[in-house]
Structure formats: structure tokens, C-alpha cells
Image: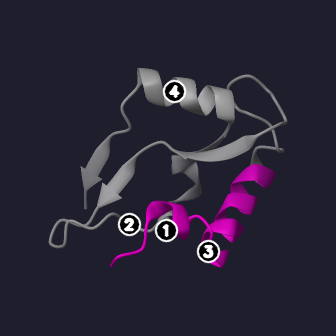
């Protein structure tokens, strides 16, 4: 598949999943409580073992996703590496 991650985040499937997570988290950053510039962060990534392809962003269970503001999201990625699991 030659679709970029950014393109996947523009699909209706991702928009629906993102909306579910934002609603669950009451449209607030779970780290600082901000209500602006919200993003949905994957706590871990999954790769399919026999293909090496990542799972689509909307295929993760909701407990593996969390609402963060842009600032907390960027800080988190600069400090922590998101784990990748082979499934």
C-alpha cells in the first residue's frame, strides 16, 4: 500500500474513531486539560508480522488511544518512544 500516514488520517474511518476518542475524553487533553489543538495519540503501534505493515490507525481499540493537545503530544514524542508490537 502506498498511502501515507497523513493520508490515512484524512479518511472517514479515522475521523469516526477520532471523534469517539475525543468524546470519551470530553474534548480535553488527558495530560494538561487543554481544550485547544487536540490530537488523538496512539499509545502503541501494531505491525502485522507476516507483512510488516502497520495496522490502520482506526483499527486500534479505544483504550490504546488518548486525547492530547499538540504541545503535550509533541513533548511526549520527544521524551518517549511509542512501542511497536508485532501481531
Q: Earlier in the sequence, mark 3 or mark 4?
A: 3
x 49%, y 68%: residue: 59
Local crowd at mark 3 within 10 Å, few (<14), some, or many (≥20)? Answer: few
x 30%, y 47%: residue: 84
Secondary structure under tag 1 reads: helix
Local crowd at mark 4 within 10 Å, few (<14), some, or many (≥20)? Answer: some
The image quadrant of residue 25 is top right
Q: Earlier in the sequence, mark 2 or mark 4?
A: 2
Pick whichever, 60 or 71, lies toward us.
71
Which residue is denoted by mark 3 in the rendering?
11
Please identify, in this view, whether the residue under mark 1 or under mark 4 is nearer the observer: 4
What label sits on residue 59 in the rendered view? 1
x 63%, y 27%: residue: 72
Residue 32 image position (x, y, % from top left): 74, 22
Secondary structure under tag 4 reads: helix
x 57%, y 48%: residue: 65
Local crowd at mark 1 within 10 Å, few (<14), some, or many (≥20)? Answer: few
Q: Specify whether 81 is left or right of 73.
A: left
Which residue is denoted by mark 2 in the rendering?
55
Identify the magenta region.
1-23
The image quadrant of residue 47 is bottom left
Please identify, in this view, whether the residue under mark 2 or under mark 3 is nearer the observer: 3
Q: Specify whether 79 is left or right of 19.
A: left
Secondary structure under tag 3 reads: loop
Residue 13 included in the magenta stretch of the image: yes
Q: Earlier in the sequence, mark 2 or mark 3?
A: 3
Provide the major secondary structure of the magenta segment: helix
Amino acid at each position: 500500500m502506498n498511502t501515507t500516514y497523513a493520508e490515512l488520517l484524512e479518511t472517514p474511518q479515522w475521523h469516526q474513531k477520532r471523534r469517539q476518542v475525543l468524546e470519551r475524553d470530553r474534548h480535553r487533553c488527558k495530560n494538561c486539560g487543554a481544550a485547544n489543538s487536540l490530537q488523538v495519540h496512539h499509545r502503541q503501534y501494531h505491525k502485522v508480522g507476516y507483512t510488516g505493515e502497520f495496522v490502520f490507525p482506526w483499527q486500534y481499540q479505544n483504550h490504546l488511544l488518548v486525547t492530547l493537545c499538540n504541545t503535550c503530544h509533541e513533548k511526549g514524542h520527544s521524551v518517549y518512544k511509542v512501542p511497536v508490537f508485532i501481531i
